[in-house]
Image (cartoon, grey):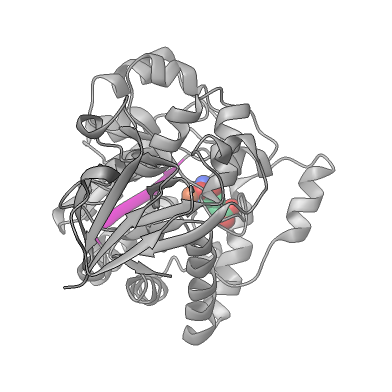
Amino acid sequence: MTTTLLTDIGTLVTNAPELGEGRLGVRRDAAVVFDGDVVAWVGDAAAAPAADRAATLGGRALLPGFVESHSHLVFDGDRAEEFAARMEGRPYAAGGIRTTIAATRAASDSTLAGTVHRLVGEYLRGGTTTVEIKSGYGQTAADELRAVRIAGRFTDEVTLLAAHVPPPEYAGRADEYVAMAVGEMIPACAPHAKWIDVFCETGAFDAEQSRAVLEAGAAHGLIPRVHGNQLGPGPGVALAVELGAASVDHVTHVTSADVDALAGSDTVATLLPGADFSTRSDYPDARALLDAGVTVALGADCNPGTSYTTSLPFCIALAVRDLRMTPDEAVWSATAGGAQALRRSDIGVLRPGSRADAVALDAPSYLHLAYRPGVPLVREVFVGGATR
Ligand code: NIG
Ligand code: FE
């Protein structure tokens, strides 16, 4: 394995408290050694070991690659006009998802794979080195199987979003749709996925239907994650906690009982402020969650309806400015928080043994991610130790 020594790092974020200051484990005058695709050493530049190659970062900040734990990339078509109508005052409704279901069903495999490839590339150029990808715009057993297979060409973090919205042929018959998902779709798709997800929301699936889908997924070895409490208060958070879901995502409308339940659980609350931005909705109360001790992840939620962005830096800026997260909290949530939402301890952190996934910024400090909103600060991305 080739070893690479990175020196002249402006500010290093390790997310390993034992390696530096605070929760971000921040170090100055640090150096890092990659050995193949893993981190081999982190310490003071003055004490750095010899390596096969040396690379200077020229005073740039280095941090773990962003970890996106929530995206919907297997789709065709866009909904720019729906977005424009919203900006003129029309509210977002879950039903817009059906527009994308129709376009996705009609698209070829190569068109869908091309879109995933393009968007994963966008994520990467924005510093995101791990992307979870959901199905959910097929909503037949065959179309969801196609989606999870395509997603699996790009990531190990494949989610079967078995119940996104009842498709038109099941209009008014959500229970029958759920029976089909449980009886046909989940058994067919489970070998190609790691996670099972459901949109538990008014206009999508209620608590009972959501539970049936998540339990069927779990019976086939999939781990639950839940879309909940996005458009209004509801049972999503409570259900996620009860079933031990890895995360509950959006959590824009929560009660104090929901916050308490999350605080007493291992379920991560994943905030997706790009969706609140693009639907001109209220933002989640991140402070209430954080101050109660809830583990918070931050994602971009790239999808053609509510959040057509792949930019974690943009979401970090939103989280700091509008959700009142500190820059440290936002950066942690977009890296280590995303990793926790995916139950991964090898990413979102730079310590010996972790994956050599990192991002170098055209800035001396990670603070610039929120301080310089909208500026393409990502200078270099390392995936498994290789520059991409
Ligand atoms: O995460 N909330 C449900 N799913 C997506 C939106 C999907 C769509 O509008 O196409 C989300 O926001
Ligand atoms: Fe989503």
Number of numbered labels in the structure image:
0
Give whichever of 64, 122 is nearer the camera.
64
**Majority secondary structure in the magenta region:** strand
Image position, residue 62 (x, y; %): 41, 48
Give whichever of 387, 73 is nearer the camera.
387
Residue 214 magenta-highlighted: no
Image position, residue 350 (x, y; %): 27, 47
Can you see residue 374? yes
Give whichever of 69, 45 is nearer the camera.
45
Image position, residue 127 (x, y; %): 47, 56
In what quadrant of the picture does the N terminus appear?
bottom left
Can you see residue 74? no
In what quadrant of the picture does the C terminus appear?
bottom left
Image position, residue 230 (x, y; %): 52, 36
Residue 371, by quadrant, is top right
Given the current orientation, which residue lies at the most extreme front position? Answer: 46
Rendered position, 357 above or below 350 = below
Residue located 40% across and 20% down the image: 290
Residue located 60% across and 73% down the image: 103
Residue located 78% across and 59% down the image: 81
Rendered position, 252 above or below 43 = above
Residue 76, by quadrant, is bottom right
358 horizontally vs 245: left or right: right
What range of the chain is rendered magenta? 194-200
Residue located 56% across and 22% down the image: 324
